Amino acid sequence: MANINIRIDGETKKKAEQVFSKLGMTPTTAITLFYNQVIRTKSIPFELHADIPNEETIEAIKEIDDMEKHPEKGKTFNSVDELMEDLLK
């Protein structure tokens, strides 16, 4: 085993470690993965990104969860015409 010492901006480190955590890995695992991919591809090889929803999507997910828990809060329609009529009110 070998040790690597690097200097990195504190905010960059914090943000990267949050992403690593969401991907289920430690910084050591992420760096090891990066090194192995560099060796394999002989390049700067990849992008990893978590599927992190934006605020609008998070709110929509919460709304759907609430509707599933409380179906009486939602509206139902018997036809597309009824739906469109309600939407155009």
Image (spheres, rainbow, N blue to C red):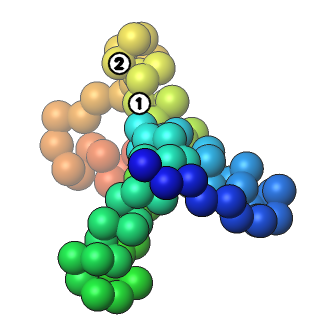
Please report the residue visible at 22 percent of the width from the left and 76 percent of the height from the top: 40
Instruction: Choose between 4 and 79: the one closer to the eye.
Output: 4
Q: Does residue 77 appear left or right of residue 87 in this picture?
A: left
Please report the residue visible at 81 percent of the width from the left and 57 percent of the height from the top: 11
Q: Secondary structure at mark 1?
A: helix
The three-letter code of the residue at mark 1 reads Ile
As drawn, 8 above or below 75: below
As drawn, 70 above or below 84: above
The three-letter code of the residue at mark 2 reads Glu
What residue is disc 1 on? 64
Mark 2 crowd level (few <14, some 14–19, many ≥20, 10 Å Cα): few
Quarter where residue 12 is shown: bottom right
In the rendered image, residue 62, in percent from the top left (x then y), is placed at 51, 30
Mark 1 crowd level (few <14, some 14–19, many ≥20, 10 Å Cα): some
The reply to whether callout 1 and callout 2 are in contact (CB within 8 Å) is yes
Q: Which mark is residue 68?
A: 2
As drawn, 9 above or below 1: below
Q: Secondary structure at mark 2?
A: helix
Q: Residue furthest front?
A: 1
- Distance (Cα) linking label 1 and label 2: 6 Å
The number of numbered badges drawn on the structure is 2
Quarter where residue 68 is shown: top left
Q: Residue furthest left?
A: 79
As drawn, 89 above or below 34: above
Please report the residue visible at 62 percent of the width from the left and 47 percent of the height from the top: 17
Instruction: Choose between 32 and 86: the one closer to the eye.
Output: 32
Q: Residue furthest right?
A: 10
Quarter where residue 43 is shown: bottom left
In the rendered image, residue 45, in percent from the top left (x then y), is placed at 34, 80
